[in-house]
Structure formats: structure tokens, C-alpha cells
Image (cartoon, rainbow, N blue to C red):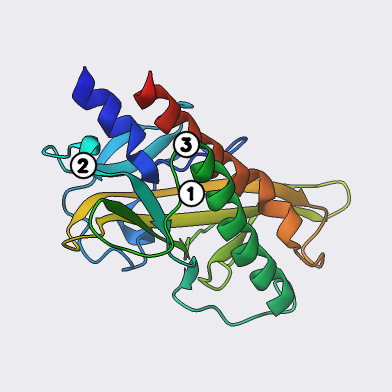
Amino acid sequence: MKLARITGALCIASLALAGCSSNVPKPDEYSGFLGDYSQLKEAKSPSGVEVMRWVDPKLDLKQYRSVYIEPTQFYPKPQPTAKIPQNTLNGINRYYDEALKREIGQAMPLATGPGPGVIVVRAAITAVSSKTEGLKPYEIIPIALVAAAVSTASGIRDQETTLGTEAQFIDGGNNKVIAQVVRKGSGKELENDSQVMQAADVKNVIDGWASDLHQSFQRLKK
């Protein structure tokens, strides 16, 4: 039981999301950011969202006193498009950083760098490939627009914004990976395929990831 709680808490990577798809990320959606995906297993975050996750069974949280959050990144590096311009990408990256620090900071002291007794959080917003029948898939970029809810009356297709993340949690003293996760979720729907996506359209996803992380730590403390 204790191990199960530890697993949930250090799903550190179990970054959850509200209002997201419950589909578990599939291997063909992995970006390569984690390097090794062979140990990932299906699991549920504290809020009940399905993720792919692995936690070192020998993990002992008592040896860690703080967390260092590396600057988040996009992987692979995206090329801005008319639908998803550079300022949107910058805004998403910046908000991910802010959300992780805000939520993790409430559960565990934040460190200024890696070192013994420090958990290093290395997170990326990653490519999510998607395909809808009868429509061409969009470019595989960190935020893919998924065509959905076709309106037969007007011929206008609503667009669903999709976000994915992969994260590693590393022992700051010896650089050993102690946990990792892959997950994805959906943000706000755009009105049509010409609407430009804004960072605000996926804030609910990021807030959910960070909030779930906070809940994981709180459960462990109890």
C-alpha cells in the first residue's frame, strides 16, 4: 500500500489534466525524449486519468528534501505555423514552467539546482500524432490540431487542441532515473480550421497536470 502511494506521488510525472481525453498514449506517439520506454505500464493518476508510467520499485522518498525543475522544453523542436505561431509556443512553454513551480512549490521546497537529496524534474511538451478518418493529419508538432465534430450543416470543422507531455524524474546526486511518465490531453475547441491557437487554449491541460502532481505529494504526506 505504501509503495502504491509512493508510486502515485512520484508520478511526479503523473501530471494530470482536466477535461482531457482518457486515451492512453500509444508507442507510435512517443517522441524519443525519454529514450527508454520499455518499462512503462498503464496506470492512473490521482484524478483517475490514464497514463503510461514507471517508478523505481526501490524508490525511498525520505532521501529527498527538495525538487529542482529544469526549464521545460519542446521535443522535438517545432516549427511555427500560421495556426500555431511562435508566440503561442512561447506562451505554452512559459506557462508550463510556471504551473510546475507553482504546484510543486506548495508540496516540496524548490531547489536552485541538482545535487544530493534533490529530485530533478525534466519535462517536455512532445509531439502527439493524430489522424481522423477522411482528413489528413496535421504536422507532427508539439501541439497537434485534431479535426473533430464535423458540422454537416455549415461544412465548418471544429478543431480540438491536443497537448502531450513526457517527463523524467532524476536523482540529482547520481543522475539515476527514478520515475517517468507519458500522457496527453485535450484543450479548448477552436471554432474552425482557420482560427489561430493561443496558449490560453491549453492552460486547462497544463493546470490539470500540475494540480495532479500537487495532489500526489499531498497524499504521500498523509
Using the image as rendered, state which of residue 144 and residue 18 is in the foreground: 18
Is label 2 in a helix, a strand or a loop? helix
Residue at image x 59%, y 54%?
162
Disc 1 on helix, strand or loop?
Answer: strand
Extreme residue toward the left, this view:
58
Q: Which residue is mark 1?
A: 184
Ranked by sequence position, the earlier of labels 1 and 2 is: 2
Residue 54: percent from the left, percent from the top?
23, 44
Above or below residue 184? Residue 93 is below
Q: Is residue 129 left or right of residue 114?
A: right
List the residue tagged with mark 3. Answer: 107
Residue located beneath label 2 in the image: 63
Residue 200, image x and y in percent?
75, 55
Q: Circle 3 — which element?
A: helix
Type of amino acid at the residue the image marks with label 2: Gln
Q: Between 163 and 167, which is closer to the camera in this rendering?
A: 167
Q: Which mark is residue 60?
A: none
Marks 1 and 3, how far apart at CA: 23 Å
Labels 3 & 2 near each other (Cβ < 8 A): no
Name which of mark 3 and mark 2 comes first in the sequence: 2
Q: Residue at x 48, y 49 (%)?
A: 184
Q: x%, y% of residue 133? A: 55, 54
Label 3 is placed on what type of residue?
A: Ala
- Along the line of sight, the residue nearer the viewer: 195 or 112: 112
Looking at the rendering, which quadrant does residue 166 occupy?
bottom left
Q: Residues within 10 Å of mark 1 (few under 14, many from 20)?
A: many
Mark 3 surroundings within 10 Å by alpha-carbon count, few (fewer than 14), some (14 through 19), many (20 or more): some
**205 left or right of 171?**
right
